[in-house]
Image (tube, rainbow, N blue to C red):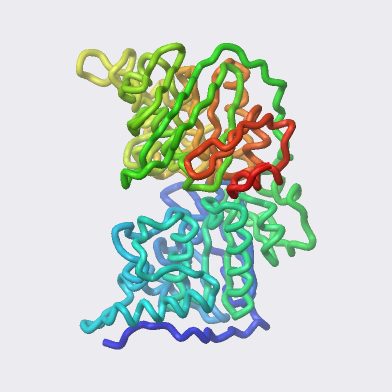
């Protein structure tokens, strides 16, 4: 069978009519209406944003476009021709490719193997020749990557390039990007935007799903806003503002600046001394890190992703052993303590960077996810038996307290939007009033409303007296939330600065390995 090596000279569709048009698309799950008569048009060669709160129906709509779901009603048109997209393979045949927020790559395979996986049907595959073709494609689109590199060894920004190349290799003309910058650093984002502009200039049509309004304003041509499954507005970017878009998304005015009272640090809660930690390959990831974190303060950790932040957080939480140094919490040496000991005796709350892989059991209900750390204790367990009434009552209280958009604690957490999944993690980790909170990328992939909620909740914990380690690659977010900022580069804390007395430019220089 003929190889599916793509023609790099992608045809430019007729821009006089919409490349994609959705006409009254409706999707119901039982009595729940996820998409309610959605109509929108996307011009050929344009970048159109799709905005909405977590749970507004964006993902459902894109899953319909990708063939994962079938609409209950409505019609999809491509180049004004009606199409039926009955499966992901049919979507690819129509030139529709989606790059998901959580990458669909096999870490153990090389770049070229991931790109051709499921696309090549030849029994006489020439991997070296295919790698050269992909290298040429990567150079053409400004997506430079080593085709023979193992995907699991690549930084997340490069893995995203692989996802885009995979879609382009399959001749995708319409690219759907779901939170594409959630794992990128500021320099990577700017390079990525240039790639998208180049793709649009060569005739590709792009739907850009993001919660970062400044990115939407700086990149896109038009924007469609969903709220509770319905289209509430479609606007040209020049005719709107970030503040208006935020209000359209959530149905109320959104405060972009957090209300952070002055810090009043008290006793030392966490002391880290000479800490060294290895990564999954056994190589040093954290090297000679020392700092103190006090009750009632937020220490932010700024740095380009992959400079040891994950290993640092895991070591403090007890998920990864320290190869050298000591960890002292509330005057107790916990360096060799298990995660169970730290949770039980010392009240550590850990918000991991990936809520789906590390924070939640997606097949469990909300109620069961909320008691993962305490399911053996009263009132949730008596003897060897779980107590359903106590578990459900606890879930109902958490749903109310943390504004989790769910009809019942018996709903599987995998059925929730990303923002509501994060609220479940918050409800579990904060409910025991922990002395130390490790917040690793706590707002990644969240809309403006959910981000506001998470940050407000963490600031309330700070006021209560918790010590918070706030780790994020979003530099402005770190500066907004922190009392002090530690800059991490190549596994080291290169500086610890007063958040009020430093600038974005100074921290950005340190993040890149420079000096002040």
- Which residue is depicted at the point 44% across and 17% down? 329
Residue 128 lies, in percent from the top left, at 31, 79
Residue 315 lies, in percent from the top left, at 39, 31
Q: Reply above or below: 152 against 331.
A: below
Q: Taking 100 as reference, is 390 left or right?
A: left
Q: Reply above or below: 230 against 318.
A: below
Residue 93 lies, in percent from the top left, at 41, 78
Q: Nearer the viewer, residue 411 or 376?
A: 376
- Which residue is depicted at the point 38% across and 68% down? 88
Residue 64 lies, in percent from the top left, at 46, 63
Q: Taking 428 as reference, is 303 left or right?
A: right
The image quarter containing residue 210 is: bottom right
- Which residue is depicted at the point 43% across and 43% down? 354
* Quadrant (top left, top right, bottom left, bottom right) of the N terminus: bottom left
Q: Nearer the viewer, residue 228 or 143?
A: 143
Q: Nearer the viewer, residue 371 or 296?
A: 296
The image quarter containing residue 47 is: bottom right
* Quadrant (top left, top right, bottom left, bottom right) of the C terminus: top right
Q: Nearer the viewer, residue 314 or 507?
A: 507
- Which residue is depicted at the point 31% across and 43% down? 282
Q: Reply above or below: 433 against 212.
A: above
Q: Reply above or below: 368 against 235.
A: above
Q: Taking 329 as reference, is 362 left or right?
A: left
Q: Is residue 401 visible?
A: no
């Amino acid at each position: 069978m003929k190889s599916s090596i793509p023609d790099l000279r992608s045809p430019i569709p007729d821009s006089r009519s919409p490349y994609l048009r959705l006409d009254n698309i409706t999707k119901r799950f039982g009595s729940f209406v996820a998409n309610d008569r959605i109509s929108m048009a996307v011009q050929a060669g344009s970048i159109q944003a799709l905005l909405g709160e977590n749970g507004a129906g964006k993902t459902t709509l894109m899953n319909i476009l990708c063939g994962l779901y079938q609409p209950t009603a409505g019609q999809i048109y491509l180049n004004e021709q009606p199409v039926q997209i009955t499966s992901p393979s049919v979507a690819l045949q129509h030139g529709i490719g989606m790059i998901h927020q959580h990458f669909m790559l096999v870490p153990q395979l090389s770049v070229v193997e991931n790109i051709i996986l499921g696309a090549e049907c030849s029994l006489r595959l020439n991997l070296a020749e295919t790698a050269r073709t992909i290298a040429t494609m990567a150079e053409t689109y400004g997506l430079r990557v080593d085709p023979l590199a193992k995907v699991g060894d690549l930084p997340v920004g490069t893995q995203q390039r692989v996802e885009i190349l995979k879609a382009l290799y399959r001749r995708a003309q319409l690219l759907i990007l779901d939170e594409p910058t959630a794992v990128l650093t500021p320099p990577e984002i700017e390079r990525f935007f240039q790639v998208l502009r180049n793709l649009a200039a060569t005739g590709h049509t792009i739907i850009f799903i993001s919660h970062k309004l400044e990115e939407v304003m700086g990149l896109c041509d038009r924007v469609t806003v969903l709220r509770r499954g319905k289209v509430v507005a479609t606007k040209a970017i020049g005719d709107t503002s970030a503040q208006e878009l935020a209000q359209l998304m959530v149905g109320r005015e959104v405060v972009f600046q957090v209300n952070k009272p002055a810090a009043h640090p008290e006793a030392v809660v966490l002391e880290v001394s000479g800490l060294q930690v290895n990564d999954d390959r056994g190589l040093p990831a954290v090297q000679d890190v020392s700092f103190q974190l006090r009750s009632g303060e937020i220490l932010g950790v700024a740095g380009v992703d992959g400079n040891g932040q994950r290993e640092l957080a895991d070591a403090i939480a007890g998920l990864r052993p320290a190869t050298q140094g000591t960890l002292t919490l509330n005057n107790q040496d916990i360096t060799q303590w298990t995660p169970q000991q730290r949770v039980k005796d010392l009240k550590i709350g850990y918000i991991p960077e990936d809520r789906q892989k590390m924070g939640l059991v997606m097949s469990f209900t909300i109620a069961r996810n909320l008691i993962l750390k305490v399911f053996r204790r009263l009132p949730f367990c008596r003897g060897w038996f779980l107590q359903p009434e106590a578990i459900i009552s606890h879930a109902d209280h958490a749903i109310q307290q943390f504004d989790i958009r769910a009809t019942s604690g018996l709903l599987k957490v995998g059925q929730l939007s990303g923002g509501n999944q994060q609220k479940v993690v918050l409800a579990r980790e904060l409910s025991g009033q922990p002395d130390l909170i490790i917040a690793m990328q706590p707002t990644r992939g969240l809309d403006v409303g959910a981000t506001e909620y998470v940050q407000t909740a963490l600031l309330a914990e700070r006021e209560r007296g918790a010590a918070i380690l706030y780790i994020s690659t979003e530099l402005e977010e770190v500066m907004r939330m922190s009392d002090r900022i530690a800059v991490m580069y190549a596994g080291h804390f290169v500086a610890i600065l007063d958040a009020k007395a430093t600038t974005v430019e100074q921290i950005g220089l340190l993040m890149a390995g420079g000096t002040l």
